Image: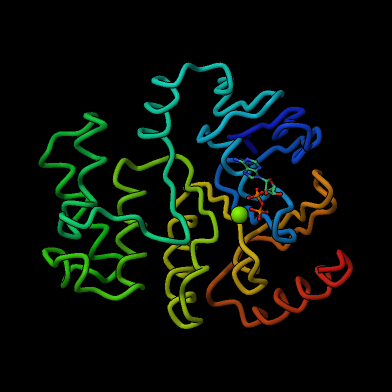
Amino acid sequence: MKTILEIKNICKSYEDTQILKDINLKVNEGEFLAIMGQSGSGKSTLLYGVSGMDRPTSGDVLFCGEDISKLDDDKMSDMRLKHMGFIFQNPYLLKNLSIRDNIILPGFKAGTMSRELVNQNADTLMERTGISGVADHDIKKVSGGQLQRASICRALINQPDILFGDEPTGALNSSTTNEVMDIINSVNSDGTTVIIVTHDAKVAARAGRVIFLMDGNIHDELSLGKYNKDDKKKSLREKNIYEWLENQGF
Ligand SMILES: Nc1ncnc2c1ncn2[C@@H]1O[C@H](COP(=O)(O)OP(=O)(O)O)[C@@H](O)[C@H]1O
Ligand SMILES: [Mg+2]
């Protein structure tokens, strides 16, 4: 197993409050990791720290063997644009652009593919996520689920090695959550590493491994094995998580 992300002794403080206390974690290429924990436990802080959106106070973040915590801001942005994808609770699409233009924008910005290829990728992604029909729509005229699918397409336009999500289903109803998670699982099946923060046990049950943050550290972790959409024992995964969460006092 090849390590894609290695976090060594990450600490993060705001003023005198230590949020992350010496966290160590290795993530394998192709893994799907979920981060859980109480509200305020530092889940977002950890995700932003490992993805270069924010800098840890101390510690190293090795991405594909390179210490990205030492990169300057421009190099870090470039690395994120070309190798990492991000989705959030809210899609954050630009209001004056169509769905398609929102998706292709980071593709043009990265400049690693021809415009033609970026457009092709966008078409393939929209097809795959079921939003081709609204490609040229104003973003104010489509549903929340469609917007979140578009934000996934945007995150994937540069074919990132890793997809990060901070509560990506937090604003969706349960059936839309399932549809969005089906997409994320299929992206992961194709080899993209996925790390998401969630408070939803059903969402975490889609991951292969779940870590629980408490008191600034990884309190425990649960291995579930790779999710398989045809698995008849899906409810068993959820049951395992619910039991485990209860042990964490969640
Ligand atoms: N920019 C900031 N300045 C000061 N405190 C912050 C900042 N960002 C987060 N925090 C604090 O850090 C703690 C962890 O926040 P966060 O990572 O957002 O938690 P979670 O995502 O688990 O809900 C919280 O107590 C929060 O108030
Ligand atoms: Mg958060």
| Quadrant where the C terminus is found in the figure | bottom right
Observer-nearest of 136 and 183: 136
193 is higher (above) or lower (below) than 125: above
Q: Residue 15: x percent and y percent?
A: 72, 32
For image coordinates 26% across by 31% down, the residue present is 110
129 is higher (above) or lower (below) than 14: below
Q: Quadrant of residue 135?
A: bottom left
Left or right: where 186 falls relative to 193:
left
Left or right: where 207 falls relative to 118:
right
174 is higher (above) or lower (below) than 24: below
Q: Quadrant of residue 180?
A: bottom left
For image coordinates 73% across by 28% down, the residue present is 8
Q: Residue 108: x percent and y percent?
A: 19, 36
Tally of numbered discs: 0
| Quadrant where the N terminus is found in the figure | top right
Left or right: where 126 falls relative to 214:
left
Q: Residue 191: x percent and y percent?
A: 48, 48
Q: Residue 190: x percent and y percent?
A: 44, 53
Residue at the front extreme? 15
For image coordinates 44% across by 39% down, the residue present is 84
Applied colour scheme: rainbow
Observer-nearest of 59 and 19: 19
Q: Quadrant of residue 25?
A: top right
135 is higher (above) or lower (below) than 220: below
For image coordinates 16% across by 72% down, the residue present is 133
